[in-house]
Amino acid sequence: MAFITDKEVLKSGLIIFRRGDVEHRNFYCRIKLPKEDRYKTISLHTSDRESARDRAFDQDADIRFRVKHDVAVFNRPFRQVAADYLQTQQRRADTGEVSHDRVKNLRNAFKKALEDYVGSTQIHLIGQDSWAGYPTWRRENGKGRFREHISDAAIQFEMGALNAVMNFAITKRLVPASHRFEGRPKLKTMRRDEFTIEEYRKLHSVGRKWIRAATTPQAHFPSTIIDLYDPAKMPDNLRRAHEANDEVLERIYIGRRFKNDTERLEKLFELYTKMTKAKVAA
């Protein structure tokens, strides 16, 4: 390294030096991790060589203790590790391994939720308690995009993002493997009895566009209602109106779009079962 000056080898794997690219004359030490081809550089905050030697040996002893007892050596805040993880995912998206939408959703999860929860926390201090406590914290400190409460789907995705960053930190050896999260907290969706006023407004708005698209004779003459609702012949504006209505309704119930028709039918049967049970009980 060209910027290293006044270098002194104290022992194998431990040196002290000054930096030629800074104005101050304080010493640094560089320590080789035992049995690894990795180094940690630490500022010693002194310009006195003898004091620098003593502090370097103290830092070396501390590093060896950490390695022996499986304690993190490289401390970084969650937001920095998350940023590094996002960069790797962006490269994967650029090569087609993952979608760009996934990277966008991950970035939103970090920015809108996880930053407030653990952004400034050192990665090695994020443990099982933080993992288990996230759903409660999230419901207490946020609202859903289309409903009053945060959906289970949103919480699950954010927890997946948190878990991915922790696994990334483990692979980069920023934390030991013992920091891997165990299990996943059980989520329980809050019971829905009726739509909120805001949800009614959204449904009313998209519903009017849907009806207008389907009942404007000038736009689709001489097509009949059967023609309009033939999947192969449905006009683009009517299809878009339907999709907008479906999206609002689906996000109200599960916080996202249904993955496929099977999932959509499962939800419909679930709602039907609840409705019929309620009528029988009454």
Image (cartoon, grey):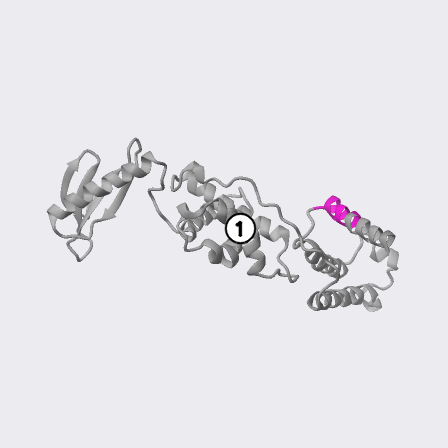
Q: Which residues are magenta?
A: 260-269
In the image, is 224 to the left or to the right of 11? right
Q: Can you identify the residue that label 1 sits on? A: 133
In the image, is 82 to the left or to the right of 47? right
The answer to whether any part of residue 94 appears in the image is no
For the stretch drawn in magenta, what is the main secondary structure? helix
Q: Secondary structure at mark 1?
A: helix
The residue depicted at 34 percent of the width and 36 percent of the height is 69
Q: Position of residue 45 (x, y in %)?
A: 19, 53
Judge by depth and name the residue closer to the eye, 259 or 254: 254
Q: Is residue 79 above or below residue 60?
A: below
The residue depicted at 49 percent of the width and 47 percent of the height is 129
The answer to whether any part of residue 176 appears in the image is yes
Please identify the residue farthest to the front as the structure is shown: 281
Residue type marked 1: Gly
Judge by depth and name the residue closer to the eye, 14 or 129: 129
